[in-house]
Image (cartoon, helix red, strand yellow):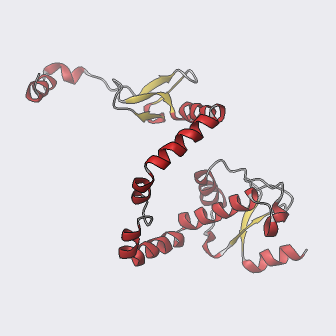
């Protein structure tokens, strides 16, 4: 059946009777959820994945946890085979591209770090580095954890709950013995943060 024939069939009077579902049942959590909770999958009849995003994330997390060795082995093998292509795809990794566009790449990075979202990404990375590498200068962070689930969770908390423009401020834990978590962080000036350390 040619493309023209298919389009003629789709224009038929019965097409108006097709109703697009607003909700869908997730077999993972057995809850009826809005279709916005499901990722897209063009191979499925309704164009949506079978499981909701939450269940899909849980499944992948458990799979990676239970099959850590095979996942790492596959990733290493794929990287070795496709290293040049992967490096070429990353912005700034291709030497020729970087040499031609160095100024633009650096400027774009500076512009992004100047935004609230970019600054919070940098702060979140610093928190993770301190908590995951408690040696040398960071020895005082031993046992301190980053309890934010993700960068987006951290950004949402700072923007919606704290309602502060953090770009000229530093992050500080209210309880210095506590973790980086909701209710225990604030943004203060450099002077305030220095005074906290002296106590």
Q: What residue sits 51% from the left and 31% below the top?
A: 52
**Quick check: 116 left or right of 144?**
left
Question: Where, by quadrant of the figure, is residue 62 drawn?
Answer: top right
Q: Is residue 113 left or right of residue 47?
A: right
For the C terminus, the image quarter is bottom right
Left/right of residue 48 with respect to residue 195 in the rendered view: left
User: The N terminus lies in which quarter of the figure?
Assistant: top left
List x then y, in percent, for residue 124: 64, 60
Give residue 33's position: percent from left, percent from top.
50, 28
Image-quadrant location for residue 103: bottom left
Q: Residue placed at 75% from the left, 59% from the top?
A: 133
Q: Is residue 82 above or below residue 44?
A: below
Picture layout, residue 113 above or below residue 58: below
Q: Along the line of sight, which residue is nearer the eye, 165 or 63? A: 63
Q: Is residue 134 left or right of residue 113?
A: right
Rendered location of residue 162, percent (x, y): 66, 61
- Residue at 53% x, 39% y: name it: 74
Which of the two residues, 139 or 17, is positioned nearer the viewer here? Answer: 139
């Amino acid at each position: 059946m040619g493309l023209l024939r298919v389009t003629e069939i789709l224009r038929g009077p019965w097409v108006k009777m097709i109703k697009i579902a607003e909700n869908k049942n997730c077999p993972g959590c057995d809850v009826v959820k809005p279709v916005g909770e499901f990722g897209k999958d063009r191979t499925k009849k309704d164009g949506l994945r079978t499981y909701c995003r939450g269940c899909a994330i849980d499944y992948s997390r458990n799979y990676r946890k239970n099959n850590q060795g095979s996942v790492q082995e596959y990733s290493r093998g794929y990287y070795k085979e496709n290293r040049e292509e992967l490096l070429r795809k990353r912005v700034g990794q291709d030497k020729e591209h970087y040499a031609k566009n160095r100024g633009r790449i650096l400027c774009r990075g500076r512009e992004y770090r100047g935004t609230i979202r970019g600054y919070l990404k940098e702060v979140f990375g610093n928190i993770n580095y301190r908590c995951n590498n408690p040696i040398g200068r960071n020895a005082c962070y031993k046992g301190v954890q980053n309890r934010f689930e993700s960068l987006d969770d951290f950004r949402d908390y700072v923007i919606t709950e704290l309602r502060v423009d953090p770009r000229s401020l530093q992050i500080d834990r209210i309880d210095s013995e506590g973790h980086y978590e909701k209710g225990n962080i604030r943004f203060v000036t450099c002077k305030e943060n220095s005074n906290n350390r002296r106590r």
